Structures are given as C-alpha cells and as structure tokens.
Image (cartoon, rainbow, N blue to C red):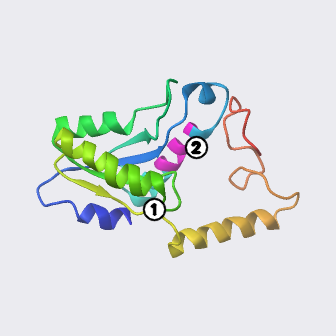
C-alpha cells in the first residue's frame, strides 16, 4: 500500500514518508513500557522489507492530549519540517490496524488541514492495513506458529527468548 501511495506523489516532488504512531507520555516510556521501542523496530523492519531505506523518512507521534511531556517528534513538528524542506508527505499510520478517529479525523482532516496551513506541497495518507489479505495472512501464520510451540506463547523471534530490551519491564510476555 505504501508503494502505491508513493506513486501518487506528483511528478517532480520529493516525498518524505512519515510513519505516524499514537503518542504516549514520556513518563510511561521511562517507566519501562516497550511501545516506542516496538514502534521504532516495526518501522525499521518495514523500511528494510520494502527496500526504501534510501528514501527520506521519519517516525512521528500523534494524538497528544493534556499537559504531560510526550514522546516525539510530533507529527506537527514533522509537518512543519516538511513545509520548510518543500517536500510532499506520505503519512503511514503505523501503529493503527483499522480506520478510526485517529486516521479518519486526525490524519485525514486535522493534520491535512495543518499541513495545508503550513504550506506542505502535497499530503497523501496510506490506508490502515485493516483486512488487507497479506496482513491477515501474516497474523494467522504468527498465531499458528506460536500455538505450535512447546510451552505455549512467548515473544522472541523463534528463539524462545524475550525480544523486548530488558529495561522494558512492563512487557506482558
């Protein structure tokens, strides 16, 4: 889906791919939640799998509310940077599986409006994976592999070990 969206960028415009995930307050991450590490690892895997490492890309976070300090960079900051750099943006809702308020309202309406206000030359959003057959097939394969393992489910890439960094002590597995 990302490749199709990249082809929609107007000729002559350089795209910047923004992988957007839901933000969290920094204090949650500092207390050991692996979320930010997992988002970064997921995006790195996507970039490597698609062979787009040479493209201009960044991870950013959305949905900030309240007075706490949040992880970043924010999508607002990345849109401002794109406007300054005069590049198109292709938004990939990374940590969102389905279309909902954070994709349909925040990304499609609010951040599109902000991008326009800032002067971003083009704004394209990749659809959430939803029921995309490759995504559903991948989930099914992972569940079957985990269920077939002796000792039940655990995280780790087939090694039988925890894959989260040890300082992320809130990992449920």
The crowd level at tag 1 (other Cα within 10 Å; few <14, some 14-19, many 20+) is some
| Pick the front one: 162 or 34 | 34
**Residue labelled with disc 2:** 38
Nearer-N-terminus badge (1/2): 2
Give the x, y percent position of residue 89.
26, 49
| Image vertical order of residue 148 relative to residue 71, above or below | below
Q: Residue at x 68, y 33 (%)?
A: 168
| Pick the front one: 71 or 69 | 69
| Image vertical order of residue 110 relative to residue 74, above or below | below
Q: Main secondary structure of the magenta part?
A: helix
Viewed as shown, does residue 3 lie left or right of 129? left
Give the x, y percent position of residue 5.
30, 63
The crowd level at tag 2 (other Cα within 10 Å; few <14, some 14-19, many 20+) is some
Report the magenta residues as a range: 36-44
Viewed as shown, does residue 121 lie left or right of 4? left
Q: Is residue 117 magenta?
A: no
**Residue labelled with disc 1:** 128
Badge number at residue 96: none
Q: CA distance from mark 1 to mark 2?
A: 18 Å
Give the x, y percent position of residue 156.
71, 50
Label 1 element class: loop
């Amino acid at each position: 889906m990302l490749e199709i969206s990249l082809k929609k960028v107007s000729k002559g415009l350089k795209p910047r791919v923004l992988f957007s995930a839901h933000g969290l307050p920094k204090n949650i991450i500092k207390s050991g939640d692996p979320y930010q590490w997992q988002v970064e690892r997921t995006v790195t895997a996507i970039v490597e799998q698609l062979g787009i490492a040479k493209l201009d890309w960044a991870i950013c976070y959305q949905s900030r509310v309240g007075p706490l300090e949040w992880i970043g960079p924010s999508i607002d900051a990345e849109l401002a940077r794109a406007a300054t750099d005069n590049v198109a943006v292709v938004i990939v809702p990374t940590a969102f599986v389905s279309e909902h308020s954070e994709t349909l309202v925040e990304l499609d309406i609010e951040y599109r409006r902000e991008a326009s206000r800032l002067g971003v030359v083009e704004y394209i959003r990749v659809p959430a994976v939803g029921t995309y057959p490759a995504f559903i097939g991948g989930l099914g394969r992972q569940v079957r592999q985990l269920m077939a393992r002796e000792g039940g489910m655990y995280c780790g890439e087939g090694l039988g070990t925890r894959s989260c960094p040890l300082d992320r002590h809130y990992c449920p597995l």
